[in-house]
Image (tube, rainbow, N blue to C red):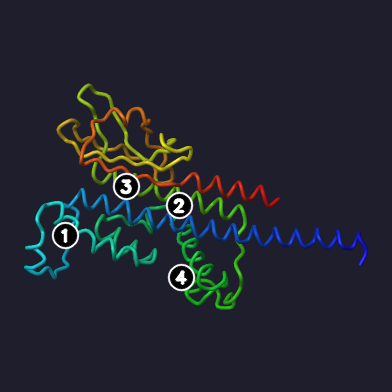
Amino acid sequence: MNKKEIQIGSIVSNVFSNEVRLKNIYNMSHIYLMTLFEAFNKDFFLDLLTNNPDVMKSRKEKGFSYEDLLNISSIDELRNFLVKPIISKVSFYNIDEFSNKFLKKYFNIDIENEYYRWVDLREKYYRRNIIVHNSGKISQIYIQKMKIKKGELGRVLQNDFLYIKECYKDVHRYISYICFRILEKFRLNRKEQNGKIIRIKPIYVNDNNSAEKFFHLYLEYDSKVYSWEPINKVSKNNPESIGIVSIAEISEFEPSKDRIPIKFDFDSVWERIIFWQNKMK
């Protein structure tokens, strides 16, 4: 083999190597984004139920012993005792069970019919599962869930940059939608006594202690300071149309034990995807 053939072989090898790396990057990005989707569901609703025990009034599950109750020494412990079993179940639900057994049951959110990107988000969830458990090959479960032809069984689904970009957007949109529906349900929109309206929603800010961006959501429960105001209706096709409150406005609020801060690393995921996408070119 001469020098030129060696160079050509090296170039071809690098091309295929980069293709494999990109494939792995796309698959890992997909997996990580859907993991963030699941982490948000668990952490957000854990805090929400803990701070809104009224949501659980309709709960019909029984099975508390006298010993359980005697071991509870405070209201906070009681809340945790009631909430944790619910959230533990959520951790094991698939996306359809989460929709029917949790969102619909506890919050009357019919996400399947209300949320315009539900079908897309659902597909990305089940595709993540076959990447993890079936090397990206279409499985019987995927065929059943997506209602596609049985002849598709075993076909490998390939992720590309545009698909991952849509995956990122769909998780982002979902978080915005859920936050909006919860704000609407609990009327977590405030009007200060001086008449200044403050709208609270998910925002992206630079964390003071880090160069990375984090997802922040602040929910306030201090009726002594603010009066409840109904949230203006917005189109379900544009959940981001709610006003944005700045970090400066948030910092003006007095600290309260009822405030729920959720720090959620999100934008940095996309920054890493872009970095590796460019690096592999």
Say which residue label 1 marks. 58
Q: Residues within 10 Å of mark 4 (few under 14, many from 20)?
A: few
236 in relation to 1, above or below = above
Q: Is residue 198 above or below residue 80?
A: above
Q: Position of residue 93 (x, y in %)?
A: 35, 66
Between residues 209 and 102, which one lies in front from this camera angle?
209
Give neighbour class at mark 1: few <14, some 14-19, many 20+ (Cα, 10 Å): few
Distance between mark 2 and mark 3 Cα atoms? 15 Å
What amino acid type is highlighted by mark number 3? Arg
User: Relative to the observer, which residue lies in front, 94 or 24?
Assistant: 24
Give the residue type that dot 2 points to.
Val
Amino acid type shown at disc 1: Ser
Q: Earlier in the sequence, mark 1 or mark 3?
A: 1
* Residues tagged 3 and 4 counted as in contact (Cβ below 8 A): no
Q: Which numbered tag is attached to residue 181? A: 3
- Between discs 4 and 1, the one toward the N terminus: 1
Res 155 → quadrant: bottom right
Residue under pointer 2: 171
Q: Are marks 2 and 3 in contact (CB under 8 Å)?
A: no
Q: Quadrant of residue 263?
A: top left
Residue 145 is marked as 4
